[in-house]
Image: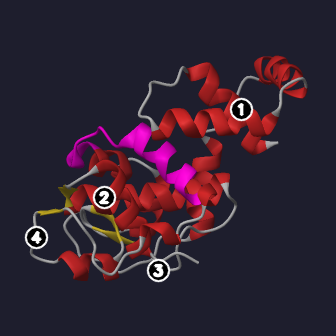
Amino acid sequence: MASVFDAAAYILKTAGETTTLKLQKLVYYAQAWSLVWDEKPLFDEKIEAWVNGPVVPELFESHRGTFSVSEIPQGIPDNLTDDQKATVNMVLKHYGDKPAYWLVRLSHSEPPWIEARGDLSPEEASSVVIPHDSMAHYYSSLLKIDIEAWKETAEVAVDTDIEKVLDASKGKIEAGEEIPWEDVKQEFDIRLS
């Protein structure tokens, strides 16, 4: 299994230098969506509900005192499988252009972080772990779609070469091309079927 360092190194290799705060949030969202799409964790390290949002302590220790980071020396990007890379690429496509504090505010508004923090004040330090089941439950709920629209897409997907659709999507993501929502939705439907 890949480590958080491998995932972070892949993010930096793909997206370039970023702030340490933003890297933590991108790693969190990559883990969350891996639990939904791939039905397994991207990495084993725990994510804690810190004041500034979800944080992986081991990754934090590796870049402590640094504002931005361009590489994670202990990470090996190629330790991620093709499916894991595809998941991280989708996360980067959706969250990668957002500023760090936008991602912090987003994570602060979502149940996994809120529930893990419980009754703690906003400024109170915490080492409470955000459970995988909490992430999987919440983020999978975001994929609820209109059943009639889904049926229409599913009927089209039956006549579609699924591997061809996924390969085309992967190619577009790797090339940095804009992907129309209908194509993204079709890939979600395929991954969910």
Residue 121 place in picture, x, y as percent: 26, 66
Q: Look at mark 1 in the image and give the residue it sits on.
A: 165
Distance CA(mark 4)–CA(mark 2): 15 Å
Residue located at (34% from left, 43% from top): 96
Q: Which residue is mark 2?
A: 12
Q: Position of residue 51 (x, y in %)?
A: 25, 66
Who comes first in sequence, dot 4 or dot 1? 4
Classify 10 Å Cα crowding around label 4: few (below 14), some (14-19), many (20 and above).
few
Above or below, 181 relative to 191? above
Q: Is residue 1 magenta?
A: no
Alpha-carbon span between mark 3 and mark 4? 21 Å
Residue on which the image places disc 4: 66
Disc nearer the start of the sequence (1/2): 2
The answer to whether residue 88 is magenta is: yes
Label 2 sits on a secondary structure element that is: helix
Question: Pointer 1 and pointer 2: residues touching (CB < 8 Å)?
Answer: no
Expressed as whole percent of the image width and height from the top left, the position of residue 136 reads 62, 58
Secondary-structure class at tag 3: loop
User: Please, what is the three-letter code of the amino acid marked with disc 2?
Assistant: Leu
Percent across and percent down for residue 122 are 24, 62
Region in magenta: 84-102
Marks 1 and 3: which is nearer the front?
1
> The C terminus appears in which quarter of the rendering?
top right
